[in-house]
Image (cartoon, rainbow, N blue to C red):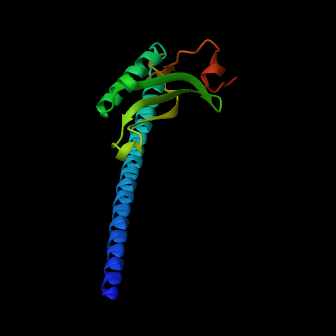
């Protein structure tokens, strides 16, 4: 009888140990999947914000000089944020003029707070994340208009670009200067 009790208690201990091990594996697997899903969602949001920042920078750099870049750029960024399925209420948009190797450029920084994540198990993982990105685009140097000069009715004429110069003159616009 002593041998039977010893084998029962041993098999019971092995069974309890197996159940505990199985539960540990399940809990760790669920936590790992939640963490992996949250990381994937964060990467997805980061890609969206990067795209929005770059598109806003390109759009803002291409605006004519007489248009308020900050207002138009912020409006475009908010439209893109909304169309990408994120809330513009939690967005912080900064647009500033800068230079890239002497050329005038526009820098756009977008930060969006409280982006929802997959709810974690037992409060181990955050419920939301704040992400941001910055993009810079060089201003469009193409002229806004052309003047047609026709010196003689029998000649074809010339196209001359009209460029608005900033207060600093030709060097501030980044245009080449040719002195005859």
**Residue 101 on image: x %, y %:** 65, 33
Image point 41% across, 25% down: which residue?
A: 91
Left or right, 82 with respect to 73, comes to left
Q: Quadrant of the N terminus?
A: bottom left
**Residue 14 on image: x %, y %:** 36, 75
Instruction: State how many labels appear.
Output: 0
Q: State whether residue 149 appears in this view.
A: no
Image point 56% across, 22% down: which residue?
A: 97
Where is residue 120, by image quadrant? top left
Q: Residue furthest front?
A: 1
Q: Which one is in front, 79 or 152?
A: 79
Q: State whether residue 97 appears in this view.
A: yes
Q: Which one is in front, 132 or 32?
A: 32
Image point 54% across, 22% down: which residue?
A: 96
Image point 36% across, 73% down: which residue?
A: 13
Q: Which one is in front, 78 or 65?
A: 78
Q: Residue furthest right?
A: 179
Q: Which one is in front, 13 or 80?
A: 13
**Residue 180 on image: x %, y %:** 70, 23
**Residue 106 on image: x %, y %:** 53, 26
Where 33 falls versus 12 (above or below)?
above
Where is residue 45, by image quadrant? top left
Left or right, 9 with respect to 97, comes to left
């Amino acid at each position: 009888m002593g041998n039977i009790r010893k084998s029962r208690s041993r098999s019971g201990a092995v069974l309890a140990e197996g159940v505990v091990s199985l539960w540990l594996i399940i809990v760790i697997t669920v936590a790992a999947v939640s963490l992996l899903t949250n990381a994937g969602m964060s990467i997805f949001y980061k890609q969206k914000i990067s795209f929005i920042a770059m598109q806003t920078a390109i759009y803002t750099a291409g605006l004519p000089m007489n248009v308020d870049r900050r207002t138009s750029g912020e409006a475009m960024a908010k439209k893109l944020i909304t169309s990408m399925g994120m809330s513009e209420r939690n967005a912080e948009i900064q647009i500033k003029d800068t230079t890239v190797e002497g050329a005038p450029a526009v820098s756009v920084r977008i930060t969006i707070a409280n982006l929802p994540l997959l709810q974690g198990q037992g409060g181990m993982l955050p419920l939301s994340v704040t992400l941001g990105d910055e993009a810079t685009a060089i201003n469009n140097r193409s002229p806004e208009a052309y003047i047609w000069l026709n010196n003689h009715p029998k000649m074809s004429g010339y196209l001359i670009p009209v460029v608005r110069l900033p207060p600093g003159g030709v060097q501030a616009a980044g245009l080449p200067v040719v002195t005859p």
